[in-house]
Image: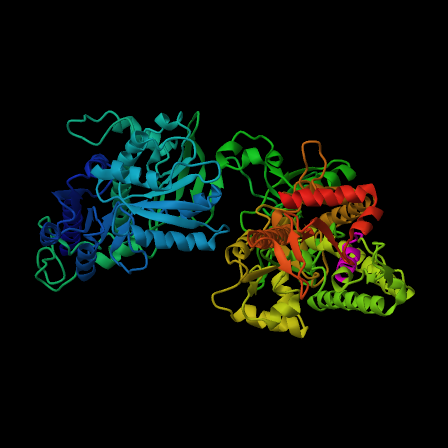
Amino acid sequence: MGTVVLAVLTVLILSADCTDNSVQYQHGFPIGAIFDWNDVYAETGFRYAMNKILRQKKNHFNFSTIIEDVSINDSFQLVQKICDHLSNGVFALVGSRSYVSREVIDSYTRVFHMPYLSPCTDYHPKDHKPFSIFMKPDNTRAIASIINYLDWKEFHYVYDTDYGLSRLMDLKLWLKDGENQVNVISTWRLRRIQEVHRDLRALDKQYGPPTNFTPINVVFDLSNETAYGAVLDKIRNVGMNKKGYSYLLGSLDIVNHDLERFSHGGVNITGFQLVDHESATVQSFLEEWSELPRSIWEGAGNTVRMESALLVDTANLLRETIHTMLKNDSTVFRSTFRRAKVYNYDLTQGIPCTGNKPWMHGLKIMENLKKVSINGLTGDVHIDQDGRRQNYSIGVYRVGFKENPRKIGNWVDKKGFVPEGTNDTLTEDGADLSSLIVTSIFERPFLQYKKEYEYPENRKNVKNPNDLYEGYCVDLIAAVSEQLGGFKYTIRPIKSSVYGAKVNGTWTGMIAELVNGKADLAVAPLTITKQREEDIAFTKPFMNSGISIMIKKPEIQKPGVFSFLKPFSIPLWMCIIAGYFCVSFGMFIVSRFNPAEWRRKCLRVDNGVVNKFTLESSLWFTMGALMLQGSDTCPRSVAGRIIGGTWWFAVLIVISSYTANLAAFLTIDKLLTPIQNADDLAAQTEITYGTLESGSTQSFFKDSKVPTYQKMWAYMSTAYPRVFVKTTAEGVRKVREMKGKYAFLLESVYNEYFGQREPCDVMQVGPPLNTKGYGIATPKTSKHQELSEKMSIAILQLKENGSLIKMKRRWWIDKGECGVQEDNQGNKKKKSLSLSNLAGVFFILISGLVFSIILAVCHFLRSRSNNKQGGFLMLGNDTTNMYYGHFGYPVEERSNGMSPKVPGGILSNAEKQDWPEESNHKINHIHATSLL
């Protein structure tokens, strides 16, 4: 009997305990909630989720919630509400947080071990927050991925909070790890939402309007959806919704913004969507959510906002966590509840802020929050050890001209951006060689977008991806395909600028695409090297190249005023001048001592003789011969003619040589380059030089055994600032911008190409440093090996029939921008001489004219002076007065008349009669002139 009574009492006690536990749990696990006054959607979602949990009969427990509304940026109010919740006793806190309130929340939760679940992003991911759960995933990596996908080279960054610049630093780090080089042009902070209009107008005024060559790309990374809505409204008002503007919104609720209004202006807007409205979970949720009365559930409606969805998932995550803890240990919270009150370690009610005891279940609740997972409205909810979301997926949406908002892909954690409809599965063993994936790299002129597809918005409706590209490699793979019967292929360029280098045993760039089985061919200017052939196969080279030196083209030397003197050196000119005077003086001396040069005077009254080769006449004779002109006098003696003949021979050679050399000097502009070859480059210190930071060119210098190249590598590897560049275009731009103080070491084919591109200010100096070839690369599999051999034969055939030469000529020469200009008739224009080439000749001409005029004036003034003095000259002791007429003819004045003065003296009357009539007429003319 006693045994039966004891058994009955035991059953009753156990039943009472179970009933007591059930009763305790049915009173609800208290959860504290703190929301900002403006968090209507978040509060409504949390209230709805808790109400729904309360109505679910399958739960063996309930939640009791205490919701407080405060200004989340008011630290005093926030601390007061946190302490009120802790004093009342709560299992966890749910609520908003901001950049201002983060330190207060983190401090109290850390001290009292109170879990705090927030529908926000972790503002400082590097800080340790052991009791914080962030339900909103960080989309910084997603923004970086989409920037790379959109192929942006630069953008403006707009933010509105104090942590905006911190997020920008994280964004730059992710962009740096990406494949493209992206620059941040400017950063703009929106101080107040009410002043968004002014800030946008200032940005557009400073950097707009966009052009075909300079589009305006803007990243808006704002703190809440209200700010995004205000920005989108003002974009239309400011007029920044036209073609050329592209915006990337950091919003995770882009679908709930009215984007259809932007489908007619030409602007491109890209954003993110955390809540997938097409999922079955969301559709089921919306059936009840849309029916809720708005008077009670203010944030409800026909669509669910991201804030509401995050709080619904937060409530369900708490429910799943408590359920898991009770499932693992039904008595885990037995000592916590007493008369529906929560007690802590020391049997005190709640967790008062004045005490020093943390929440006894805080650590276990946090551990289980990070272990459980749910399928919620925002997708799969998994929390990592840092309290942040992991393994999540974000939809990417885009709106453009005449295009409604559409989903273009998903950004997946641990994978990155996955465009809609893409399939990246390509195995090595199962490679289908009937349709090949061709990887390449954007390098002009090998591969580039066609002009009409340079902007991403123009590439949307292109059915065949191969139609987007043009270049030497496009022509090459088409020609090889034709030679092999026309196999199908798809060109898929890599987004990075890395050809392929082995880093810590792992290949990068195009070679990684081949090694990892993502591509079948690499058709690009890929150099055949020993290291690369160890892991991939190459065809016969389709083009040969070599490392060359590119420098900025030096300024052309302008011709001097006396550039016509440059064909002869100064010593040669001195010899010519000395020869001129020596010949003239020699002619004068020879004529004086040679009787043949003396002739009788022309007047019959005088038997004297005269020598025509005076010193002045000798100088004039030599000058006439030098200028290829004649003179009135010629030598009659043998000696004189020998001197004249030798001088003419010398002048013939000198003038011929001068004429030939002058043509070259006046028509060819000289370029004086500071260096001529690699030895000159290595020996000097004024000009810096570098290569691509990865690739065969850098490896050449790194592994070279030549002393000159070793010296160059020692300099390049230690130079500061760094002399290596990421892309060939960057290296060319650096050569142009540094004004002759930087030399770029690159392959000669690029040197030739950029030397033919405007502004035509770079050039190659010296011969190539080595010789190497470009080949088509394939993976090292049996199927691809056979294909590689066939393509080698096709390349040899293209070489033999001249097709490769024609391809290169088309892209290097025919499309060049620095060739010889042609006139309207297609004739090549000759280079014309400018005034500066022959200015000195005209200076000499003008000087001669001026000097002759001065002499003539002086002579005239002297004659006038003589006339004013009476025109009479005393000739020694002779009393005969000579009168000079206006033209300088001497006339003798006698009592019986005037007689002409002749070299033999004064003619007598008898002698006058012997003169011919013509002479008498001249004398009479002189008389008449003198009398006037």
Q: Judge by depth and name the residue closer to the eye, 441 or 391.
A: 441
User: Is residue 59 placed above or below 564 in the rendered structure?
Assistant: above
Q: Judge by depth and name the residue closer to the eye, 382 or 761.
A: 761
The verdict on residue 623 being magenta is yes
Q: Is residue 284 visible?
A: yes
Residue 99 image point, x, y percent: 23, 51
Residue located farthest toward the front when viewing the structure as drawn? 896
Name which residue lies at 42% across and 29% down.
266
Q: Which residues are magenta?
A: 619-630
Position of residue 54 in the picture relative to residue 878 (left or right): left
Q: Is residue 113 visible?
A: no
Which of the image's four quarters has the C terminus? top right
Name which residue lies at 12% across and 49% down.
74
How was the colour assigned to the protein in this rendering?
rainbow
Residue 245 image point, x, y percent: 40, 35
The verdict on residue 586 being magenta is no
Residue located farthest toward the right when viewing the structure as drawn? 638
Residue located farthest toward the bottom when viewing the structure as drawn? 707
Residue 97 image point, x, y percent: 21, 48
